[in-house]
């Protein structure tokens, strides 16, 4: 980037970028050029002060933000050029998310640090996988409790303890039903994350007393919105829970579940998302030599969205910062909206200047995004109860949008259905006529949170007597009427229409269920839309199944959580009864289930596989796989397991599949080829293709609008997308956590070394490991809300943070929705402020007289 970069900054931005202070806090308001300042700071350090890029650490909160930062740095000449990213080369800024940084740290530390319990090839569990493992922990603890009570440990077909136990004696009530296990696991998932973060932040780590105290603190910190508080004894059920769940929801049992969950993680050589922060904090607490080594790596640390850090993340930053390391943090306490997931806004407003008294603060107050009226309305909302810490008035840089009507408008509707259809009518009208005008609405007493914004839109509501027409009746006919009118008038726009900018409109809401009437209205009105934060790609069943197969391939002897997902997927006659028998055998032998099944048929890492058989001898499907696996030896614990003939055959097919894929990986086959071979040979694709043909006209469910054939087609398309993605390593290999790996994974890729750098990076077991790490680190994100599809965005306010649109609707501003009674009013006000400041040209806020959906 040319030196004139500094000339493109305003005075506030330039002062922040050029500062020489060692500890700097940048308060960046909405639309103030925050990312530009971070990029310019890195560029300035490298090009003007001669800092080695590799000695700069930049931390963001999302992969999208990290990738954007890398791209901008590359364009500025700071970092790898296009096509070089992710090749493991030095001389570039290390730009990571917090979780990506934790993963990078653990990969390098695990093989050299004793006592961690995992090796450098650990797997990262996403939220769904973690919850699945928690369910297994619940079942294991309950079984141990019953066996200790002398009740024999009888279980149902799912492996859950079967038979009632005394609540007062054993801490167990009636057996847990499926819904009970799910409810308890969801509660425990929230609690365990809080407990781990709390343990890391205050330095509690491994001993039993520390865990007991951390569980107590985590439990005591839970409020009514996150779960029922725990006591020291079993409790009576509330109206929202069963007796079985209530009897287990007390400190003693929760601590047992927590400890069992930790043991199962180690057994699977796995970590969850909380561990990616908490384990590095623990290692740095316990190993001063690690602290010294990592502090010596960086001269400058840049942190974006600092107001969203939780206590453990803030501690990690302090651990990595040496005495001479410069710390440059950017954020906005007025946009702190993630308190519900542990973020601590005081990290930026209070603790940073407390811990580093020489911290200098710079304010970025100029808003380049929004119309002045929108800026004014947002500021009124923010200061309704007085200015917040670090508040500075926002200064609009742009003039009002010409010819686009009133910038801020308040609407009142009879109900949410009427609201949705009227919004659809407005949007449809804009796109068909090119008009950019706002309709006025009848005034009404706004909800308390709206009062400040309403004061800034008094002129808009002057037409108090105007009757608001119901949009529902006219929404479907509006398009035809406008089209006919244009044709009759000879409007040139009718002959050469411009492409509608659907993507520049967003409808935001506090709760996800408010999207339902909007989706119905938009569908009926022919408006293309995307629901941001819907089901993420990586969480579709077929995608999660394919990923689970790759996990089993990568580490067949420590993969129980993934093996149990795919052991009978597609159906291979290994049902619940067979699985239960194998679990019992594994427990009796003191080994994981995966070791029981694969221990005698998997070649170790670094082994030389036999030559690839001729094409005519390669397996074509499941029926050919059983012959590839060796028979179960007489000394194998698996030999004693009583299986039906069909189950034994199905198990041999799975063993043969894993052995074949493993050998292919050891031969250096690339990731895309391994995935395609897995989907073909397992029969997974064949099952879906059969359903695509045979399922026409057969409803997926009684209420479903699509049939089995359509569903199968969509699933096949997603698998095709996944396979194409796996075959493009440049799209998923970023800064390489495995770059320094000198163990078995690197050896497995050696066979591909002659096929060029790109092939080597995604070849063999090392390629599989890189792919799975990417899948894990992006699974937890909401995805790219902006996206490439030209469609209106329906989004929660939380998911819209960081985005901007020409026109924004915020719906559902009613007590009990926005603001929510389950969240502090200050955070609800900040959430509303974030929504208001997403709008560039026009903002529409609305509430309903009848809030019921």
Image (spheres, rainbow, N blue to C red):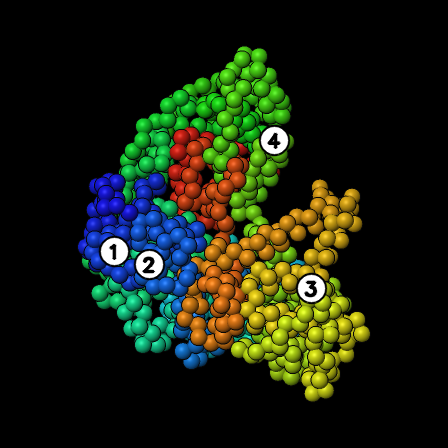
Tell which circle, 2 or 3, labels the residue nearer the N-terminal end: 2
Q: Residues within 10 Å of mark 3 (few under 14, many from 20)?
A: many
Q: Residues within 10 Å of mark 2 (few under 14, many from 20)?
A: many
Q: Marks 3/4: CA distance?
A: 42 Å
Task: Say if residue 218 shows up in the picture.
Answer: no
Q: Which residue is mark 2?
A: 93
Q: Residues within 10 Å of mark 1 (few under 14, many from 20)?
A: many
Q: Which residue is mark 1?
A: 46
Q: Position of residue 206 (x, y in %)?
A: 44, 76
Q: Marks 2/3: CA distance?
A: 42 Å
Residue at position x 25%, y 56% from top?
Answer: 46
Q: Quadrant of the C terminus?
A: top right
Q: Residue furthest right?
A: 645
Tell which circle, 1 or 4, labels the residue nearer the N-terminal end: 1
**804 or 198: nearer the viewer:** 804
Q: Position of residue 379 (x, y in %)?
A: 34, 37
Q: Which residue is mark 4?
A: 526
SS at mark 3 in the image: helix
Q: Which mark is residue 681?
A: 3
SS at mark 2 in the image: loop
| Left or right position of 163 against 819 | right
SS at mark 4 in the image: loop
Residue at position x 53%, y 32% from top?
Answer: 848
Residue at position x 49%, y 36% from top?
Answer: 503
Q: Residue furthest top?
A: 489
**602 or 283: nearer the viewer:** 602
Tell which circle, 1 or 2, labels the residue nearer the N-terminal end: 1
Circles 1 and 2 in contact, beta carbons < 8 Å:
yes
Mark closer to the observer (3, 4)? 3
Q: Marks 1/2: CA distance?
A: 10 Å
């Amino acid at each position: 980037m040319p030196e004139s970069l500094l000339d493109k900054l305003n005075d506030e931005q330039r002062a922040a970028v050029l500062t020489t202070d060692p500890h700097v806090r940048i308060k960046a308001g909405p639309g103030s050029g925050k990312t530009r300042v971070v990029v310019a700071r890195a560029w300035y350090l490298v090009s003007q002060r001669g800092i080695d890029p590799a000695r700069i650490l930049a931390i963001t909160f999302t992969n999208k933000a990290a990738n954007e930062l890398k791209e901008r740095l590359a364009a500025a000449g700071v970092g790898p050029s296009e096509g070089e990213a992710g090749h493991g080369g030095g001389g570039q800024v290390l730009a990571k998310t917090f979780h990506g940084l934790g993963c990078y740290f653990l990969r390098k530390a695990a093989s050299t640090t004793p006592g961690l319990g995992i090796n450098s090839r650990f797997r990262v569990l996403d939220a769904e996988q973690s919850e699945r493992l928690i369910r297994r922990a619940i079942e294991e603890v309950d079984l141990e409790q019953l066996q200790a009570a002398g009740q024999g440990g009888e279980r149902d077909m799912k492996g859950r303890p079967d038979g009632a136990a005394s609540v007062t004696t054993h801490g167990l009530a009636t057996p847990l039903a499926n819904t009970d296990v799910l409810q308890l696991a969801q509660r425990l998932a929230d609690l365990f994350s809080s407990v781990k973060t709390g343990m890391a932040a205050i330095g509690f780590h491994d001993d039993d007393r520390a865990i007991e105290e951390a569980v107590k603190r985590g439990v005591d910190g839970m409020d009514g919105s996150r779960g029922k508080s725990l006591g020291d004894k079993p409790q009576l059920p509330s109206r929202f829970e069963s007796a079985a769940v209530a009897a287990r929801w007390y400190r003693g049992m929760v601590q047992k579940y927590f400890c069992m969950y930790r043991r199962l993680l180690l057994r699977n050589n796995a970590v969850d998302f909380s561990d990616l922060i908490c384990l590095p904090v623990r290692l740095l607490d316990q190993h001063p030599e690690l602290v010294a080594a990592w502090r010596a790596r960086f001269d400058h640390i840049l942190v974006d969205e600092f107001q969203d850090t939780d206590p453990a993340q803030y501690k990690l930053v302090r651990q990595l910062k040496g005495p001479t390391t410069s710390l440059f943090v950017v954020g906005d306490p007025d946009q702190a909206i993630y308190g519900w997931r542990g973020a601590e806004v005081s990290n930026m407003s209070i603790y940073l200047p407390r811990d580093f008294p020489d911290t200098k603060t710079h304010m970025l107050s100029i808003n380049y995004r929004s119309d002045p009226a929108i800026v004014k309305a947002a500021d009124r909302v923010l200061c309704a109860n007085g200015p917040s810490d670090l508040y500075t008035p926002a200064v609009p840089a742009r003039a009002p949008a010409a010819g686009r009507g009133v910038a801020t408008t308040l609407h009142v509707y009879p109900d949410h259905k009427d609201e949705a259809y009227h919004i659809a009518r407005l949007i449809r009208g804009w796109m068909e006529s090119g008009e950019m005008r706002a309709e006025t609405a009848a005034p009404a007493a706004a909800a308390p949170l709206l009062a400040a914004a309403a004061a800034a839109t008094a002129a808009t509501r002057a037409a108090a007597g105007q009757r608001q027409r119901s949009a529902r009746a006219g929404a479907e006919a509006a398009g035809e009427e406008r089209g006919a009118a244009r044709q009759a008038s000879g409007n040139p726009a009718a002959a050469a229409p411009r492409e509608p900018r659907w993507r520049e409109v967003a409808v935001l809401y506090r709760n996800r269920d408010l999207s339902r009437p909007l989706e119905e209205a938009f569908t009926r009105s022919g408006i293309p839309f995307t629901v941001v934060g819907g089901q993420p790609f990586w969480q579709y069943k077929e995608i999660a199944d394919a990923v689970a197969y790759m996990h089993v391939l990568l580490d067949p002897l420590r993969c129980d959580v993934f093996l149990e997902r795919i052991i009978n997927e597609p159906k291979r006659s290994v049902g619940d009864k067979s699985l239960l028998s194998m679990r019992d055998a594994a427990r009796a032998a003191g080994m994981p289930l995966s070791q029981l099944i694969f221990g005698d048929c998997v070649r170790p890492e670094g082994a030389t596989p036999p030559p690839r058989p001729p094409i005519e001898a390669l397996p074509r499907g499941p029926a050919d796989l059983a012959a590839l696996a060796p028979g179960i030896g007489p000394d194998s614990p698996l030999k004693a397991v009583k299986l039906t003939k069909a189950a034994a055959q199905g198990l041999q097919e799975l063993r043969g599949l894993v052995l074949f894929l493993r050998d292919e990986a050891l031969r250096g086959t690339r990731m895309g080829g391994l995935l395609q071979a897995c989907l073909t040979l397992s029969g997974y694709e064949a099952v879906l293709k059969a359903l695509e043909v045979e399922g026409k006209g057969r409803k997926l469910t009684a209420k479903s609008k699509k049939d089995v054939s359509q569903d199968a087609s969509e699933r096949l398309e997603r698998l095709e997308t996944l396979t194409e993605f796996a075959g493009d390593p440049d799209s998923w290999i970023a800064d390489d956590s495995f770059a320094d790996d000198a163990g078995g994974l690197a050896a497995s890729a050696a066979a591909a070394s002659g096929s060029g750098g790109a092939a080597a990076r995604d070849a063999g077991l090392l390629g599989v490991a890189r792919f799975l790490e990417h899948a894990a680190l992006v699974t937890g994100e909401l995805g790219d809300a902006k996206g490439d599809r030209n469609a209106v965005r329906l989004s929660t306010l939380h998911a819209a943070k960081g985005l901007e649109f020409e026109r924004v609707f915020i719906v559902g501003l009613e007590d009990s929705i926005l603001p929510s009674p389950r969240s502090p009013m200050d955070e609800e006000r900040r959430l509303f402020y974030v929504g208001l400041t997403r709008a560039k040209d026009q903002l529409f806020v609305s509430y309903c007289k009848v809030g019921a959906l």
